[in-house]
Amino acid sequence: MDALNNPQLQQLINQEKERAMANEMIAKLTSACWDKCITGIPGSKFSSSESSCLSNCAQRYIDMSAMIVKRFHSMQ
Amino acid sequence: MDSFSSPSSSSPSSQMSAEDFMDQLKVQLAQAYAEEFLETVRGKCFDKCITKPGSSLSGGESSCISRCVDRYIEATGIISRSLFNAQR
């Protein structure tokens, strides 16, 4: 088996790579948003403000990323 | 036996199938992910729950840790769904 000469295998490897990168993004964002949103001692469930903070956090991160790209391009 | 001969020049039975390779790749990725996840949870819950280390884990510390692990897993799901819903 020579991975470099097998296009189907390359595609499968690329899919796993994308999956791993998506998982890493989720992990990093969860860590950052946990720090921002879960300020007290963890309870037996999230308060509604904690859970909306978490989902807002992810969406604002996406908005921010788009804004950064746009700004960066407008400066070139 | 020439210890410098390349693996691809040896017999087919010593080569791995593409399927076996992908299985091994997926297992290793899953293991790496699990280890990283556990390390993150350790850090977060240590910060939240063990504020003044005593001579053993108190009942309060233990239940805090349990809740913390559950909440962190839940938070991962919330973030994951939020990201998925935002992208078209």
Image: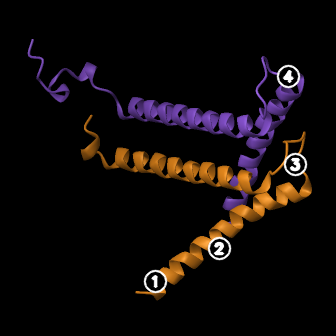
- Is label 4 in contact with label 3 (beta carbons under 8 Å)? no
Picture coordinates of residue A14, whole percent (x, y): 42, 50
In the rendered image, which residue does mark 1 sit on? A73
- Disc 1 chain ID: A
Q: Quadrant of the C terminus of chain B?
A: bottom right
Chain in purple on the image:
B
Visual hue assigned to chain A: orange
Q: Name the mark on residue A46.
A: 3
**Residue B72, quarter of picture:** top right
Gap between marks 4 and 1 measured at Cα: 54 Å
Residue type beneath disc 2: Asp
In the rendered image, which residue does mark 4 sit on? B58
Q: Please tell me how crowded label 2 is: few (under 14), some (14-19), or many (20+) other residues with Cα within 10 Å.
A: few
- Disc 3 chain ID: A
Picture coordinates of residue A53, whole percent (x, y): 80, 61
Front residue of A39 and A16: A39
**Residue B19, quarter of picture:** top left
Q: Is residue B59 left or right of residue B68?
A: right
In the rendered image, which residue does mark 2 sit on? A63
